[in-house]
Image (cartoon, coloured by chain):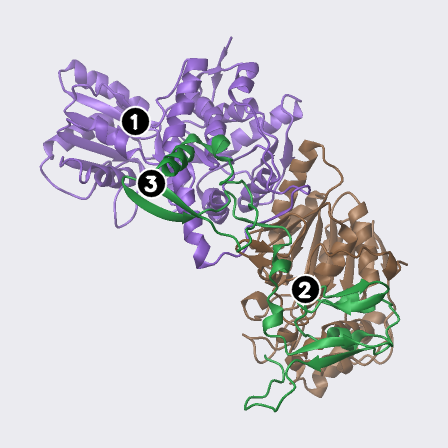
Chain colours: A purple, B brown, C green
Amino acid sequence: MMSVTLLTGSEAAAYGAKLARIEVLSYYPITPAFPAMEKISKFIEDGELKTEFVRVECDHSALAAALGASLAGSRTFTVTTSQGLLYMTEVVYHTAGLRQPVVMAVANRALSAPHSRFPEHGDAISQDASGWIQLFCENNQEVLDTTVQAFKIAESCRLPVMVNYEGYIQSHTLEEVDVPEQGRVDEFLPFMRVSALDVNNPQGINTVTSPDFYMDYKYRQNEAMQQALESINTVAADFGREFGRDWSGLIEGYRMDDAEHAVLTMGSMTGNARIVIDELRENGKKVGLIKVRSFRPFPREALCKLLKNIKLVTVLDKNIVFGAGGALGMETKAALFGFRAVPVKSYVVGLGGRDFGPQEIKKVIALSEENADRETAFEWFGL
Amino acid sequence: MLNIKDLPKDDLFGPGNAGCRGCGAAIAGRQAMKALGSRTIVTIPASCMATLSGNNQRTAWNVPFYHTLFEIAPAVSAGIRASLDAQGIKDVNVVSWAGDAGTADIGFQSLSGAAERNDSIIHVCYDNEMYMNTGGQTGSQTPLYAMTSNQQKGKKTGKKDMLAIMVAHGAGYVASAAISHPLDLFEKFRKAAARDGFSYIHILAPCYRGWDIPTDQSVATARRAVDCGLWELFEVEDGIRARTCEPEFIPVEDYLLPQGRFKNLTVEQIQKVQSDVNRYYGRGEVKN
Amino acid sequence: MIIFAHCTRSAQKGFGASLGRWEKYCSHELTALGMIVAFTYLKRGRCILVKNLPVVPSAKAGSMAENPSGISWREQHPEINTACNNCLVCTLFCPEGALVEQSGQVSAILNLCNGCGTCAVECPRKAITMVAEYQGAPGVFSSKGCK
């Protein structure tokens, strides 16, 4: 029996970590991620969650402490955003290279400078080469469910996972969320302790590595990422069977069966895009939505399959890679290369929290169709 | 006082390490591990110690050892301790073993955090007074007037007093040690290992390359540092301070001049150092 | 072919299944030769040779002692004479742990010694002398300690 309650995205992430019975928690407060942190601390203080908390003095140390605990064999969790995520970037890469299954909730926020506290995906995109699995959530229910799924994916691939949701739009907004029963989550998420720092079996971890070995380690790390493509789908399917919601694993096609125009989204804009797609469909337009849930590993094959008969692709990016384009747009073009030639219109939208609601989505779809034959690397919308 | 014969014969660190001849860090590591024992987890940030500990698939440690990023050894140790607490494991020492950079400079933030939180870890600073792993640049622990690879004219500021800073954090056990006084070092490690809460031990570990001394003089140089009074051996246990070795007060130049890094010291500079020592110990002639 | 198929299947099964004899979590046992066993992945008809490495980059405890490096460039080694009274002070000052007590006497494990000379300086009874490895005619370059 599940309980339906009103939760913000922050609270949903906190409930996800609580249901996963994390053993060690560390975090450093930062806007807009701190409500999730405070909620978990409240669970601990109220005795609802038995977790050791390390009150670190900076974001960099937050992931360091989580990593240390993970190496010693505990299930660990942390939360951050934007500047904090960039501050801990060194530890982000390090954690992935050490193959530790840490789960991190990221309340996506724009990067300084100029200083912004409003939502966009730039912070997550900056970590795309780090070796972390990156999943993007559409709504608060998905935040809770994905956090729970993340532990299972992480522990099966031995790769850390970022659960992304947008600051304010999701982190501070109340939505109806089913909170699954603890007992059923325990069955879904059993814990097997694997310790790299064990006095009964001493090992030297992370020795200085020469060129003879480093590349082989990286190859194997990437193989684990490839394995995650399957794992993300399997875990989603298992979760769906158990709890009734699967969130489609890597990627979802919405009303794509006979679509001629595909719109790609990631994160919170997906919810609004569904509304727009429905409206356009009622007016007879053959348009469909592709929700990219897993940005890393990027689901090339699954995406290409969805785009088999498409005549126009519109990609909406809430991020910018300067001098290159929107990250999702570039991934899409790369995936299509060698598969099919089809126009891809890439739009950079909503940076630094600029409004990008249903009206804007409708406008950009129309704009894309008008300019379908104009080839550009990417364009800006909303200036 | 401990007797050498009572110490464990096995080496949990040392044999086969890739250190230079006469490496003070390796001596410190061997001595400390005799006191800490096999139920110890050691985290070491980027440093000479991390490099000489081994590479690829080989390590010189016989206890679990983790080579961390430069800044984070104390934070990682705090996380390891939290995990051991969650698992109900109480009899394992968690030690972050850092050089002077990983303690006093780049690692200072996470060290300060661990000390303030009173995490049950032992932070050890093995101090060769310069950034030896990158060739010997100046750091905050480089003493006044010392020449380094990037400051040939000598350092213009003094050595940042890490022991006082750790005492100011309220750390329950703070101690200085030197590789020339191993029995004193063992006592201090034993005390730290027996305690809960945060402990800090700062070991003077000369480096023949950085200090420009012969390879066989690491221990003798450390002894002279203690004997002239520049490196005081003391401990602060729950706020109570006690000196653990009375210096003989040999002239400071007996310590300074045999080291190539002090070869350009002027008479005035030596007098200033001597005067500072005298003032500190409240004895002899003090030149202002 | 059977071996290749076995490897590929295991690579896809996930961590639990792959904790088998060729993919340990931490450092696996050293072979007589050293460390590496070549391992093949079959990918779309092309073979890629990747070293068989632990999941977490790691090393087996104590493995440096099996192949110490100092002996190849050592310039001198200690010889302990009868003045030694087994006080064991030198055993605390050796950076390599090469001095050990054996049957009531201190002796040097030469394959660990890199010839620093600290023991000879520190011995309270001056029972240790450093003996040069090369005893012949001096060469063109002086070997008075590297900087």
Q: Where does label 2 land, which residue?
A: B25
Q: Amino acid at mark 3?
A: Leu
Q: Secondary structure at mark 3?
A: strand
Corner quadrant of residue B133: bottom right
Corner quadrant of residue B13: bottom right
Residue closest to the eye, C42 or A40 = C42
Residue A117 image point, x, y percent: 42, 38
Q: Where does label 3 land, which residue?
A: C42
Residue closest to the eye, B16 or A70 = B16
- Say if residue B204 shows up in the picture: yes
Q: Amino acid at mark 2?
A: Ala
Q: Are marks 1 and 3 on the same chain?
A: no
Q: Secondary structure at mark 1?
A: strand
Q: Are marks 2 and 3 on the same chain?
A: no
Residue C125 image point, x, y percent: 86, 77
Q: Amino acid at mark 1?
A: Lys
Q: Where does label 1 land, which residue?
A: A291
Q: Is residue A259 left or right of residue A246?
A: left
Vertical relation: B216 (above or below) A303: below
Residue extending furthest toward the right:
B1
Corner quadrant of residue B243: bottom right
Q: Are marks 2 and 1 on the same chain?
A: no
Gap between marks 1 and 3 measured at Cα: 32 Å
- Say if residue B156 shows up in the picture: no
Q: Secondary structure at mark 2?
A: helix
Q: Residues within 10 Å of mark 3 (few under 14, many from 20)?
A: some
Vertical relation: C136 (above or below) A327: below
Residue closest to the eye, B23 or C63 = C63
Gap between marks 2 and 1 measured at Cα: 55 Å
Q: Indicate the chain on which mark 3 is placed.
A: C
